[in-house]
Image (cartoon, grey):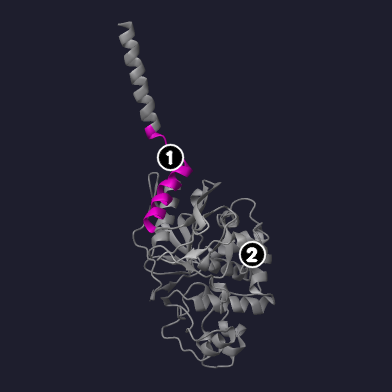
Amino acid sequence: MGKYFKLRLFIGLCFVSMNVLAASPQSTEEKVNAIIKPWMQQRGIPGVVVEVYANGVPSSYYFGYADMEKTTPVTGNTIFEIGSITKVFTSILLAQEVLAHRLKLNDVTATYIPEFRANKNTPFAKITLRNLATHTSGLPFDEPSTIKTNRQALSYFSRWRVPIRIGQSWAYSNVGMGLLGYILENNMHRSLNTLYQQDILIPLGMAPLGINVPAKDAVYRAKGYNQAGKFMPPKEYWVFPATGAIKASGNDMQKFLRAALLLPGTPPSVGDAMRLTQTPFAKTNFNQQGLGWVIIPLQRLNDQWILSTKHSTSVGPMPSVQLNSLETQYNARAIIEKTGTIDGFKSYIGLIPATQTGVVILTNRYPALGDTNRIGHNVLLALSR
């Protein structure tokens, strides 16, 4: 009986141990792998960077290849196009100027662009800097394809007429953010790339790449691939670089993510501006819009953060409302996010400040529409449990 009892006790302890292991929480790495690896395989994505903060603790994960032909692995030094996440950097520059009392969000655009000011009937006498940064200006998604230079764009839009009521419709506009970048350059008397470097990248300890990649760093650039898996040459010229021209590595984007979460050690010159950009200034039936950032309020049920199913990845147009001063309140119980798309690349940054959790996802192939948002949400909610 003694031996039989001991055997049963041993078997019972084995089952208890197995149950404890099965019930043990997944690590951050296991959660990231469980989401990213199947996605890469399903979508045929060559390389992915995932930079994470989970409860204020950073970690990095690198998958696949920066160059499929040479089988060059993705590392923390691999440089990706971040596309429209550039708009967040541009918005931070605006917020810094607002906080320094050199610009006001309600300043009208025509004040800072002589080509627009000369026309008494221009809609830019009503379109504010706030409208430009929140995509509520009524401006189109892009400039016409025939426009190749900055001057041509200014000439074209000096004669343009807004088709909707300013401030009452949200429509994603590269033109609006591009004009904002032009205004910042003129007002601050420095090139946009210098502004990014001196006012954001260097204070955060990021490599001062910005818009251009020096020849010595070209070896670190990832190749971008289209949906058919074909290499896409990088876009080297921009009419409006403020919309999507920044390049960055995973190492650098982790530093930016830390600042986006407003974690201790963030320089006030960036942190204060970051908080202003993450404050909602307009809303649609789906989301709120900060300066550059999209804001999706969250609910909490027990230990679960719940993302409303009523959110949209549409570029509009859709009805919007400008928020008043009492409604423009920073909300840490939200997903604050931005995506970026450019030939051969797709990027995502999202964060939940209330849990000190954030993620940056950089890929060198464009997946399905809305895919990166979905994956970003999955990572954020998994790490916030």
Horizontal and vertical percent for residue 267? 66, 57
Q: Can residue 90 be seen in this view?
A: yes
Please name the residue shown 56% across and 77% down the image.
238
Q: Which secondary structure, mark 2? A: loop
The location of residue 43, given as percent across then percent down, is 38, 58
Residue lying at the far top in this picture: please name it.
1
Identify residue for label 1: 26
Instruction: Judge by depth and name the residue closer to the eye, 69 or 234.
Output: 69
Q: Main secondary structure of the magenta part?
A: helix
Is any part of residue 385 visible from this angle? no
Which of the image's four quarters has the C terminus?
top left
Identity of the residue furthest to the front in this view:
69
Image vertical order of residue 336 relative to residue 320, above or below: above
Of the two numbered discs 1 and 2 in the rendering, the one whose residue sits closer to the viewer: 2
Which of the 4 image quadrants contains residue 215? bottom right
Q: Residue 209 carries which label?
A: 2
Q: What stretch is highlighted in magenta?
A: 22-43
Closer to the camera in the image, 101 or 144: 144
Please check the rendered image and state whether residue 39 is part of the magenta-colored stretch, yes or no: yes
Q: For numbered disc 1, what is the local secondary structure?
A: loop
